[in-house]
Amino acid sequence: MDPIFAVESLTRRFGGLSALDDVGFNVARGSIFSIIGPNGAGKSTLFNCICGVYRPDHGRVVFEGREITGQKPNRVARHGIGRTFQNLELFRNMTTMENLMLGRHMHMRSGVWSGAMMFRRQSRAGLEEVAQRERVEHIIDLLGLHAARDRFIWQLPYGTQKLIELGRALAAEPRLLLLDEPAAGMNLEERHDLVFWIRDIRDELGVTILMIEHNMQMVMSISDHVLALDFGRMIASGTPREVAEHPDVVRAYLG
Amino acid sequence: MLEQVLISGLAYGSIYALMGLAMAIVYKTSSVANFAQGEMATISTYVAWVILVSHGAPFHFAFAGALAVAAAIGIVLEFAFVRRAKQPTVLNLMIITLGFQMILYGFAGWRWGADQKRLQLPISDREVFRFGENTISHLSLATILIAAVLMLAVYLFFQFTRWGTALRATQQNRNAARIHGVPVNRVMAGAFALSAMVGAVAGMLVAPVTTLDPTMMWDPLLKGFAAAVLGGLTSLPGVIIGGYLLGIIENLFGAYISVEFKSVVAFAIIVIVLCVRPSGLMGRHYVRKV
Amino acid sequence: MKRDYFDDVRLARTGAARLWLAILFVALAVTPFLASPFLLYTLNLMAVNVIVAIGLNILVGYTGQISLGHAGFVAIGAYTSVLLVSRLGVPFPIALLAAGFLSASIGFLLGLPALRLEGPYLAIATLGFGMATTVVIGRTALFGGHMGLVVPPVRIGPLDLSSDRGIYAITVSTAVILALMARNLMRSRTGRAFQAIRDSDIAAQMAGVDLARYKTLSFAISAFYAGIAGGLWAIVLGFINPGMFNFIVSVLFLAMVVAGGLGTIAGPIAGAILITFLNLQAAKVQTLPLIGPLLEGFSRQFMTVGGLPNVTWILTGLILILIVVLEPMGLYGLWIRTKIYWKTWPF
């Protein structure tokens, strides 16, 4: 196995409570890796520790052989890790296009002066702006967001917003994509499309996917590897079938 | 020398503590940082001055009148403006209090002009008590005592009355309080009224030392905020301690370093505290969940 | 479908917009030859306030930070440019730029502690900054203390531009250039990063935006605008003293931004023009037809006549509150709504 990403004995406590307790795993390049677990199992805390929102008390996060433990979110992003959020974190007062352009932020150069001097098409910022908008248009094509292109986020339905968040993460061309409950709040049809897109992202763009998801059906159908957490501990890890049949997982889910 | 500096620091600190307390009461209950607090106190002090000078009434009359007007202004701010905010974001609520501040500032200037008035208290700021080598003016002593009594009263009010309990409940969780039958709207108005009265007392203690004019409370407002930041906006005892500390630090700075730039100390303290410990000495810091 | 992506960021997208822009520029160019000195003075003040408001809006409207100390930056700009010209004989344009950059550096420094602050804490810190600035200026001999400084005549090379028209040429052209630059900047990478921070700081970070860098940058740019405006304010008024830059003036600047509409370029321009107009009218409110005598009579009866100009504060305060209560997007929102109304009329 060629691990693109690894977590080693990650621990994070809040007060006396262990939200994460000695969690460690490897994610193979080009795989879809799912994390399941009941509410409060520490899944989101795990993502926040990876992305630098929280600093872990103990343990390491390694991406492409480089340790990134405790680095600030923008540093983590620059290494090539993208993320979506459990409760949408979109730029609500900006248009879809502008949201996606934020995804290109790291790949753009123009600063204050060249931005302020963007009077003509041939100006530095003007050229860059046009080139990057063309690239973002591909993502709009891919996710079918044409109708939403120039509308503000707050004008759009929830399902579309979830897609835009996915699109924004993709626009940054990450090599590892963290999806925090991508299917939450979606109806059956939307979920169907989502499964299709996630596969596409992996197969076509070669992005490794690390995903938190509650919907077992979806997890079982697309994951290469599943990890189950409960009260911050790993209780099972393996293929979808192995994990689904693990007695501790059954117990955690059924009470 | 040092003791003298500490004593006058304590007197100034009492005022800052009162202003800080006034702001913390409102901030804790409604997350509104009330930038109109200073002007509200100024208007109340003007009212006391009018009752004293124009009507020749005895001082306790003026004092009571000022407090009543303060409470009314506080209720108006809450009921007529803060409650009406369409999107009660931190920024919008601040803007409302800033707008109210401008209205009151304009009103004071229009009604009483920009010229400086003198509020004469029955307590002299010239006569002094002596003890050892040190002196303390009657007014400073009264300031320290009145502030201490008032703060104790506010504490008792919070701990032992039904209104106080309702206020604390609202502070902790507005919705839970509402579900348990606390009349949250009225409690909020009450918090604004209480805070305005505390501010008014500060105003009446400041006016005899400085002069009475529409900008009188700008400086104490900033100091009150500095006290609140120093102690932690969310902790009432913290704010009071912050006020005393600020008064003392400021006076030490004035005595040993520079009198001229004494009032820059508050800003320096705000910046330093916010850099080192943003939640203040005793406050709690909240982190948003994602 | 082939799309021209530059259209998204172009200054004027349609022919009509280009025409209006051209008309506006022509109007601004011919005004000094037709207007009375008082009107020119009014326009000069408006141009200065437009610059402050646009800059403040970059901070408040676009980046979602707040400043209650912008008068402090304006003061720094004003004193810097005046002292550079009068003491060191620096040519005015260079002094003005230096004023902007000094103000920007101080804005950057103030932005550093502001990194860790949100909402009321930031407001308090900037309030403290504004007050501390006027205290320091008022107590320092170099700055003329409370008496202030007289502004030397404005010269650019051999040209004496101290007349109202000369000053108009400087203030209005600067305002136009700075407005256009702000607009470009807000449509480009930097401006998008600011807005992203405003709407969701964590998502902005995950898009690779360095919060510290961009927040301080926003403070610096905003302070740059205020500094330039300060230098211009000095030449418009002819004298400066610390009292001109007090707390209430900072709130007034904020009122211009809020009145116009946060997070737009046209908004603060409209807001600055409106509030400046109100302020100047209030100073001579007695001479207004109808309202003037009425207010004067009322003042004589219940208030003081000398304090009558203070109605401007009351009005501005009411505008601030009403906007938050009724129309959070300010004048700009009102304009958009009217436009939609007329488009769909009579349905």
Image (spheres, rainbow, N blue to C red):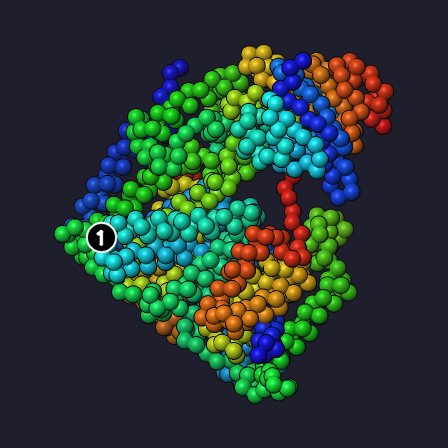
Residue at the spot of label 1: C91
Q: Chain of mark 1?
A: C
Question: Which quadrant is home to the C terminus of chain A?
Answer: top right
- Horizontally, is A125 left or right of B133 in the view? left
Q: Nearer the viewer, residue B267 or C11?
A: B267
Question: Which quadrant is home to the N terminus of chain A?
Answer: top right
Task: State how many labels appear.
Answer: 1
Give how far across and how far down residue C239 sits, in percent.
Answer: 28, 63
Q: What is the three-letter code of the residue carrying label 1?
A: Pro
- Horizontally, is B86 left or right of C162 in the view? right
Packing grade of label 1 (10 A; few <14, some 14-19, many >=20) is some
Query: Image height check: is C161 above or below C61?
Result: below
Residue B252 in which image quadrant:
bottom right
Give how far across and how far down residue C162 sits, in percent.
Answer: 19, 57
Residue B201 in which image quadrant:
bottom right
> Helix, strand or loop at disc 1?
loop
Give how far across and how far down residue C26 sits, in percent.
Answer: 21, 41
